[in-house]
Image (tube, grey):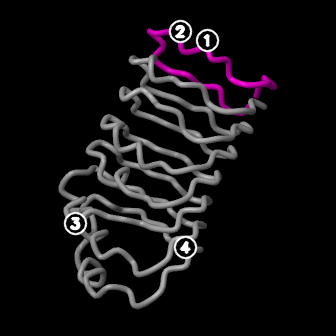
């Protein structure tokens, strides 16, 4: 663990050939500078800091993104542009609004959006045909309404945590049909 403080300098984006940026477990505060110019960046880990504000534009080359345990807020709807993303961890922040798009990214296999302020979960009708998603952690949000029936179309899903939310109504019958055969085939 380091004890680096202040804000992440904006000049960091001048390292155009940077492949991985890991500044986790520090005392950085302020917003995340624009990193869109880091077109070779495949891994970004800024977790366990004191960063706040909304998500900046991120490089589409990212495969791993961890911004967990900060004070980031706003919406995440622009993350659908990260078509190469495999792992996403935005847990323990203050993101709000709707969760959509990230669930059906083609290469994503693990999504952790737990402990945020999300209120809606949208699962596209044919999400399962287009994604490698295996782990979906959405616990401790403010998700409400019915459980999305389209979750059953996510064929590779082996772990799902929807606890500590505000879902209501019955568990869709089609979920029970998946119990007889493994969710993952």
Circles 2, 4 touching at the beta carbon (< 8 Å): no
- Between tags 2 and 4, which lies in front? 2
- Is label 1 in contact with label 2 (beta carbons under 8 Å)? yes
x 46%, y 10%: residue: 16
51 horizontally vs 5: left or right: left
Q: Of circles 1 and 4, which is in front?
A: 1
Cα distance between the residues tagged 2 and 3: 41 Å
- Residue pointed to by mark 2: 14
Name the side, left or right, on which 35 lies relative to 85. Answer: right
Residue bearing the label numbered 4: 163
Question: Residue 128 location, x and y as percent?
Answer: 23, 59
Q: Is residue 55 above or below residue 5?
A: below
Q: Mark 1 highlights which residue?
A: 11
Label 1 to label 4: alpha-carbon separation = 41 Å
Task: Tell me residue 169's x, y (percent).
Answer: 43, 90
Earlier residue among tags 2 and 3:
2
Q: CA distance from mark 2 to mark 4?
A: 42 Å
Q: Crowding near pointer 1: few (<14 within 10 Å), some, many (20+)?
A: few
Camera-side residue of 149 and 175: 149
* Labels in figure, total: 4
Q: Is label 2 in a helix, a strand or a loop?
A: helix
Could you say where residue 101 lies in the image, as x and y percent from the top left? 34, 52
Mark 4 or mark 3: name the one nearer the start of the chain: 3
Magenta extent: 1-26
């Amino acid at each position: 663990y380091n004890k680096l403080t202040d804000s992440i300098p904006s000049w960091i984006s001048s390292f155009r050939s940077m492949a991985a940026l890991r500044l986790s477990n520090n005392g950085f505060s302020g917003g995340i500078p624009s990193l869109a110019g880091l077109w070779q960046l495949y891994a970004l880990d800024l977790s366990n800091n004191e960063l706040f504000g909304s998500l900046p534009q991120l490089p589409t080359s990212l495969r791993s993104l961890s911004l967990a345990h900060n004070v980031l807020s706003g919406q995440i709807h622009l993350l659908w542009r990260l078509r190469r993303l495999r792992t996403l961890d935005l847990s323990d922040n203050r993101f709000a609004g709707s969760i959509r798009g990230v669930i059906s990214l083609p290469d994503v296999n693990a999504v952790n959006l737990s402990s945020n302020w999300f209120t809606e979960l949208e699962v596209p009708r044919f999400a399962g045909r287009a994604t490698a998603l295996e782990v979906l952690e959405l616990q401790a949000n403010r998700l409400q309404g019915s459980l999305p029936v389209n979750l059953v179309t996510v064929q590779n899903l082996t772990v799902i945590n929807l606890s500590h939310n505000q879902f209501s109504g019955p568990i869709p019958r089609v979920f029970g049909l998946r119990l007889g055969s493994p969710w993952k085939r």
